[in-house]
Amino acid sequence: MKDEYEEEERSEKRENVKVVLWEWAKIFLVVFNTIAGLASIIGFAASLFSDEKKESIIYLSLGILFFAMMFAVIILIRSNKNDKMREVSKYARGFHEVLHLIRDSFEDLQEVEAMESYNTPAAFRKYMTEKVMVIMDVIAKNISDATGHKVRSCVKMFDFIRNGEVDKNKIKLITLARSGRTSVNNMINEHYNPISLSENSDFSFIFDIKEGYEEERVHFFYQDDLIRYAKKNTYNNSDPKWKKRYKTTIVMPIRYLIIPENDDEAENNEPHYDLIGFLCVDSKKKKLFSIEKRGFILEYLKGISDILYVYLDECISYHEYLKEGNRK
């Protein structure tokens, strides 16, 4: 684990250097080519006139040079806008890839259920974990490519159970799958190291939201400078080394709002959430998402969380079916 995080840190530094060098290179090339081109024009124009007119030509040329430089700046600004559009295109392509992958995984799951390909919960758990690992890799790569910085993603779950527990001090979470894991067996081993929901401020914040969905209500946890946030607020994290591992974090609930039919005899007639886990994205780069693209990435992750619910909900149901079959 230590070597993995050290390699990530070195990779992050290399990527930061590349981004800075490329930005300066673009500015240098535009300015240098503009000045070089205009210098040639000025020299040629001055050579065509007598000494008396050269001074006027030089002043006129300097004026042209000034406006050319302004034009170069405008080109750079528009270039940055084009860069943003390319970034949005990367998100869009990545979103399509994720949805395509989850759709195929769901169809494969339906075939597994029909053929009863797995006889034990353990075998099915391994199958499911491997599928979600691939999904996490795609999400992390998509956001990393779009932002130019290393991003990780993972899914935390209530260990394949639905027991209606309302006391968050008793709830445990497992890391079902995370990006960057090459071995499914290593990932499975993490399942046996659960964490307490109450020891993590981000999960507790989301778990405590009981009201129905409201457009303006913040129903996720997001901080772009988590270390600064922790200094000003009470922040708990069950990972003692979290400060070394990430500074920006987004946690989206994987849940569905259940609205019961109007039945006076129903035990729970109030709208409530079926919360099965969390989609987590983090990076060592603080303020990874600027204001103008923050809303976009949040909506992007909301969409993925929604479709993940459908897939993971079906996986949990089939896992419960296998557990019940083993008891008989």
Image (cartoon, rainbow, N blue to C red):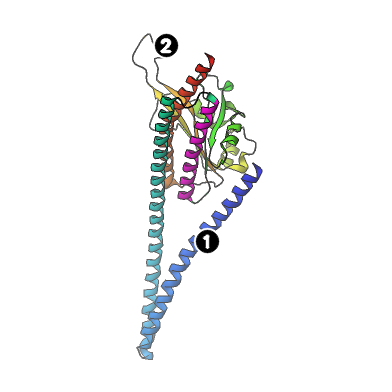
Distance in Å between CA atoms under marks 2 and 1: 62 Å
Q: x and y percent of residue 295 in the render?
A: 41, 42
Residue 48, relative to residue 119: is it above or below?
below
Say what secondary structure mark 1 lies in: helix
Q: x and y percent of residue 4 in the render?
A: 62, 45
Residue located beneath label 2 in the image: 267
Say what secondary structure mark 2 lies in: loop
Q: x and y percent of residue 276 in the render?
A: 48, 26
Residue 92 is a magenta residue: no
Number of numbered tags placed on the structure image: 2
Which residue sits at x=40%, y=66%?
A: 72
**Main SS of the magenta segment?**
helix
Q: x and y percent of residue 44 in the render?
A: 38, 84
User: Which amino acid is tagged 2?
Assistant: Glu
Towards the viewer: 232 or 178: 178
Give the side of residue 118 with respect to residue 257, left or right: right
Residue 173 in sight here: yes
Towards the viewer: 266 or 177: 177
Q: Which span of residues is magenta-colored? A: 122-147
Which residue sits at x=42%, y=79%?
A: 39
Residue 294, relative to residue 71: is it above or below?
above
* Mark seen at residue 21: 1
Residue 163 in sight here: no
User: Which amino acid is tagged 1?
Assistant: Leu
Sequence-wise, the earlier of marks 2 and 1 is 1
The image quadrant that residue 57 belongs to is bottom left
